[in-house]
Image (spheres, helix red, strand yellow):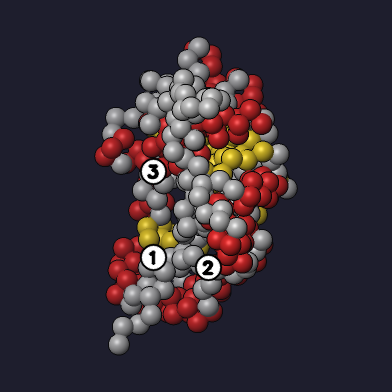
Amino acid sequence: MTKARVYLSPPHLLGREREFVTEAFDTNWIAPLGPHVDAFERELAAAAGRPHAAALSSGTAALHLAARMLGIGDGDEVLVSSLTFSATVNALVYERARPVFVDATRTSWNLDPALVVGELDRLGRSGRLPKAVVTVDLYGQCADYAPIVEACGRWGVPLIEDAAEALGASYQGRPAGSFGVMAAFSFNGNKIITTSGGGMLVADDERWTKQARFLATQARDPAPHYEHSQIGFNYRMSNVAAAIGRGQLETLEQRVAARRRNFEWYVELLGDLPGIDFMPEAPYGRCTRWLTCLTIDPARFGATREDVRLALEAENIEARPVWKPMHLQPVFAGCRVIGGAVSEELFEKGLCLPSGSNLSQADVERVAGIVRACCRAVG
């Protein structure tokens, strides 16, 4: 008999999702927009420490609209994390920008602030500043914002925060999503909370979220007929999706606690193995441990990251390599890169283990047992 599948990060219904969705059906608010959209925007904005939010169809849509509204266009350079999911960069390329990929730091696996500051200073002195900087809060951990925000402010370069993976995380007491001109969240099915598919743009300035809603509804101008003076998009979230999101958001802290507990279990079960190192929690904040990530040094462990991943897959357990850096992706060949060695090593050795908030201790023990069995360390 095939063993039960253990997924990397499956959806988890934990609260009043069904109640809110039923309300949407009972009141016939199943079409796009509605009271749950308005409420979800308010509640998510509060969780992100922002006064304003616009509910959208995906985190990618939020990033794309942020790029569009900042006037990022043909040939504009944008400094962006290399160690990320491709959506971060795709949203920039939609507007024909030229991404400049910046390496990660080992202390957080996030964008290296020293490289960002150094590049902004260099470009500023030469009069060739980038159009924007895009940070990524990787695997539930915020980037090191203090030096990046200071440098962006000093040179007048807008900052966009890709907080898609980090709802519930914090940096120096401030929540993920509270940095930059605008920030984007994702509610894809594998995230800490999901709307089955959706995203959110948050901002301090209401003009950004108003403009985002306008562009996200096909840029329809005020008129009794359909009048359009700009190109728009079909990017708004539905009332039913927002209803799911509201139920999920109510239990955010429980979800974070469960994922952090998973991480602690993995450390307890695997932390003594030679060649195993877990993604560090930076001292400046709280990581949600959206995914439990580790690196495997084959010289010490006796097996590669891929050996371990395939052993887990053979037992019907989903695990994935750490993001392949964008500067190594064929589609972005030829883009400028600052550093890269750290991101490359994390990809080569990094593995993401099952981390869902509905993961049981028995599931973690099953995963850990297979990882331990792969260890062929000598001496």
Determine the secondary structure under disc 2.
loop
Q: CA distance from mark 3 to mark 1?
A: 19 Å
Categorize mark 2 by other alpha carbons within 10 Å: few (<14), some (14-19), many (20+).
some
In this rendered view, identify the residue nearer to me: 80 or 39: 39
* Mark 2 vs mark 1, CA separation in Å: 18 Å
Please name the residue shown 38% across and 61% down the image.
320
Give whichever of discs 2 and 3 has the lower sequence position: 2
On screen, 286 above or below 210? below
Tag in front: 3 or 1: 3
How far from the left and from the top, in percent, is residue 147?
63, 33
Name which quarter of the figure residue 309 lies in. bottom left
Residue 147 makes an appearance in the image? no
Question: Is residue 213 at all visible to an observer of this figure?
Answer: yes
Q: Quadrant of the N terminus?
A: bottom left
Check disc 3 and report the residue beneath it. 86
Q: Secondary structure at mark 3?
A: helix
Asked if 349 appears above or below 3 in the picture, the reply is: above
Q: Residue at x 61, y 66 (%)?
A: 19
The mark found on residue 12 in the picture is: 2
| Residue that carries the numbered disc 1 in the rendered image | 319
- For label 3, the crowd category at 10 Å Cα-Cα, with few meaning under 14, some 14 to 19 and many 20 or more, is some
Taking 45 as reference, is 229 above or below it? above
Of 224 and 41, which appears nearest the observer?
224
Give 22 or 208, whichever is nearer the viewer: 22
Could you tell me the amino acid type at mark 3? Ser
